[in-house]
Image: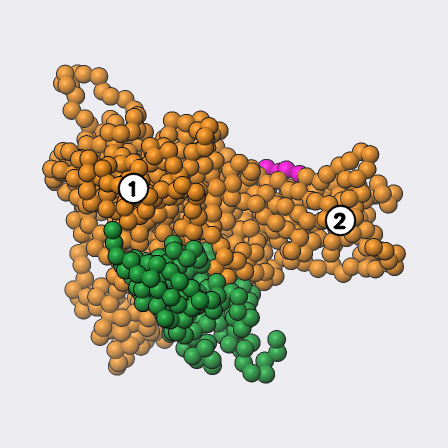
Amino acid sequence: MSLKHDIEFTLNGVRKRATVRVDMSALDMLREVIGLSGTKYGCGEGECGACTILVDGMSLNSCLMFAADCHGREVVTIEGLAADAKADALRAAFVEHGAVQCGYCTPGMVMQASHLLATHPHADAEAIKRGIEGNLCRCTGYTKIVEAIAAASEATKPGARP
Amino acid sequence: MNVAEKTHFIQPDTLIGKRIHKMDAPEKASGKTRYIHDIDLPGQLYGKILRSARVHARIKSIDTAAARALPGVHAVITAADIVNQRPIGVAKDHLPLKTDKVRSLRDEVAAVAAESEQIALEALRLIKVEYEDLPILTDPAEAIKPGATLIHPEPHRPGGEDALKPCGPVAFTGKPDNIAMRFDYCHGDVAQAEAESDAVVEDTFKLHYVTHCCMGVSGMIADFDASGNLLMYSNTQVPFLHKREFAEYLNMDPARIRIIQPAIGGGFGSKLDIYPFEVICVFLARAAKRPVKLVFTREEEFVASPTRQPVLLTLRSGCKKDGSLTFRTVHTLHDNGAYTSWGATTPFVMMQTFSSLYRVPNCDYHTIAVYTNNPYAGSFRGYGNLQATFAVEAHMDKLAEAIGMDTLEFRLKNAQEQGEVTGQGMEFNSCGFKECLTTATERSDFRRKFAENVNNRNAPGPIKRGIGIASMLHVGGGAKIYPSDGCGTILKLDDFGQVTLITGASEIGQGSETVLSQLVCEELGLPMSALTVVNNDTAITPWDVGVHASRTTFIAGNSALGAARLAKAKVLAAAARKFECAAGDLDLRGGYVIKAASGEALIDLPRLMRNLHFQDKAELVMTTFYYEPPSMHQDKRYKGNVSAAYAWASQVVEVEVDTETGIVKMKKVTAAHDVGRVLNRLGIEGQIEGGIVMGQGYALTESLIIENGVTRNPNFRDYKLVTAPEIPEMDIAFIESMDGEGPQGAKGVGEAPAICVAAATANAIYNATGVRIYGLPFTPERVYRALHGKGEKLYLAPGKAT
């Protein structure tokens, strides 16, 4: 039997307890222990960004983080963002600007974009491209993703019309 | 509700050409879409496969006792456990679980179903396999030589040569040589044409391994019900063909197989064939009597899913001084890998480009696909056309230069036109090729930049600018490969004016459900919100040949349109009876039946539907339509009008080449695509942008490195996909040639944008540096070596090696 660990953390604004194997990744915990499947497995080694989540406001690849290290942290996944009114502009922009095709990279891309806009609210196209360079997309050629993030940035500027 | 009797009028509006977002995008952007990885069935077990990790070896023994004894393991299977295992694949040379031999690194030796992935992996480690290594054959040029190691040797027959040969598929009978497939095509007389040519060029091109890299890894769930019916959750792009094929491989009645397709994390052609893991997953479910889910790791995806076809290609082309092409002779050597999948059949598409992209009066084409111990190639967006176009467009530049003609002028002189019937029998009923050429070159200022770059080749400074052009021809109205190239639609209008579109066409992320809905809404005068699409269950949806050959918008579009027209006729006939007028005077618009001439609204659709339904002679509006395109099967000589329409494109690529480092930066791509007609501007832009960047990866960064049969870079760290900061500026123009057969005039576009990029990039590098590179990708090392006179040596013409 492999070692297990009891942890307590905040997940999408709700306090959460979980028992996890010590070798389990945060990604596997989210998907298999907690049952939130919005965070995707793409490569398991931090190269594709499909599993991007926010931990204490930082974006990271949940496949590279131990589940046990979530203890005491504040974790936000795509499901948490989906329930957040402030993130509506971002999601709506992804939809309206055609930034979604097969959609498999999309949750990670949206999480990364939300982190980017939180930390660099005035990012221009070049900065947006840099901001998502760790997130691979095989369908869109990135252009529409960059446009969507730029539009969301514009829409959430103070004084912007809803 | 008191419906006001006040007269109101509805203005005409259209959905065609608008920017309409994908219907499934809100779910996908919220993380709510369930891919195969996200689906779990009650009682489900997890399947894992033990692969050979040997490139070529005899299996001496397999010991599974320890694995079977591990707690939580429900089934361990090897070939010995499967009665009457049937070979899969295009040439039926591939047993899902290997019996006596492994022929490539990826080969499946055993499989486990267990209560968790962890236990399954632990069980795999407990399986002991003894191998005896065999000579490895990884060079296709060696593989065709007499005396080469045979990958599928004929089994030893007791009784000597006179004994009866075993009959049946290659997996059982073997082959006397390593030749998996041959293709020979010809029109005209190339020898005579060469004698009459003023300029002749010949080169050998080496096209490499790349792979699909779908962001969602391969996976499958198999579940038998209590009556023995099989339900598969599958990523297939061809559910109806697979239903029949699975039945054959599993020795089942096809009627007892149902395929449900959850959302797919990328297709690009990778899911057109049945692979061993899918059959093995069913074997495991059968053995364990529980549902089994089998999902790849990313490393497994790189090692054990198909590649694009690597090709060694020798092209000889000629023209006259006046610029008219005279002939092309092509010999290609396809590295088939150890087994045969669709990659071997890419000559079907390649020969079209050689014979028919430009007007070539004489063409000779030969392919030999040979078995090696390398990974095997499948179908991949473009299907051989990237490789063929790479060679053809290099020669268009070289011939133009040889006769001193402007390279654009040379292309325009030989470009196909509407009404042309090619030597291969392709009929171009709509053709915007010349407009693609002029549009792409004018928008990119091609001529000026081309001349300027040539003049600047010897200017000081390491950075050289280059501009290059390439064009493509691809099927755009389906491809009649199977007995039918059709698609069925069932359309249902309910009491609330909602429409359910049940289509055979699969959504693989490309946006087919949105564009099909658009066509139906346009016909029925409804908003997009009135549509629900059902498209992922063989027990519900009508037959379709599958998502391939850029066919869905054209074929499934015409099918949906046909069903919508029937529904409209039925609705208008009912309204005409009610309002005592001729149906021809009525129309549907904005959710109402209107007077066609004035736009005056007569009755809203839901009310009319309820009128029809709740009366003594109750009626529902449900229609069906099957569309079969007016194309034909090719004859034995590969001649015939295989598609109902053809797509055209010209792309201009601009690069910066750093001659000191060999780094090539793609700065801009100007793309002009003859798409027939733009149906959904947002969707079609997305297809083209995504295709261009996929083409950029093929040209510059992607290479699956296979050394002695071993995949050296099975991860995204070493297999370099293009990332956001590297994408070029893209200027996309649509040529609307309004195809007479296409739905609202549209033609297929899915594969087109990926096809020309590498070819145009090669021409741009030449324009920048005066050095032509014949192999891909244009990595800094390859470019540096070419620029500094240390280029790799290529093989002789493969056709001559026999």
Question: Viewed as shown, does residue B62 lie left or right of B87?
Answer: left
SS of the residue under disc 2: helix
x and y, in percent, of residue B150 in the image: 17, 35
Look at mark 2 in the image and give the residue it sits on.
B606
Query: Residue B72: which numbered mark, if any?
Result: 1
Which chain is disc 2 placed on? B
Q: CA distance from mark 2 to mark 1?
A: 56 Å
Q: Which chain is green?
A: A
Reply yes or no: does residue B684 show up in magenta: no
Q: Which is more toward the observer, B646 or B171? A: B171
Q: Which is more toward the observer, A55 or B57? A: A55
Q: Amino acid at mark 1?
A: Gly
The residue lying at 22 percent from left, 75 percent from top is B660
- Asked if residue B323 shows in the view, the reply is no
Question: Viewed as shown, does residue B310 lie left or right of A137?
Answer: left
Note whether B713 is above or below B124 in the view shown.
below
- Asked if residue B462 shows in the view, the reply is yes
Highlighted magenta segment, given as a residue range? B623-627
The residue lying at 14 percent from left, 16 percent from top is B159
Q: Amino acid at mark 2?
A: Pro
Q: Which chain is orange?
A: B
Q: Residues within 10 Å of mark 2 (few under 14, many from 20)?
A: some
Which chain is disc 1 placed on? B
The residue lying at 51 percent from left, 38 percent from top is B538
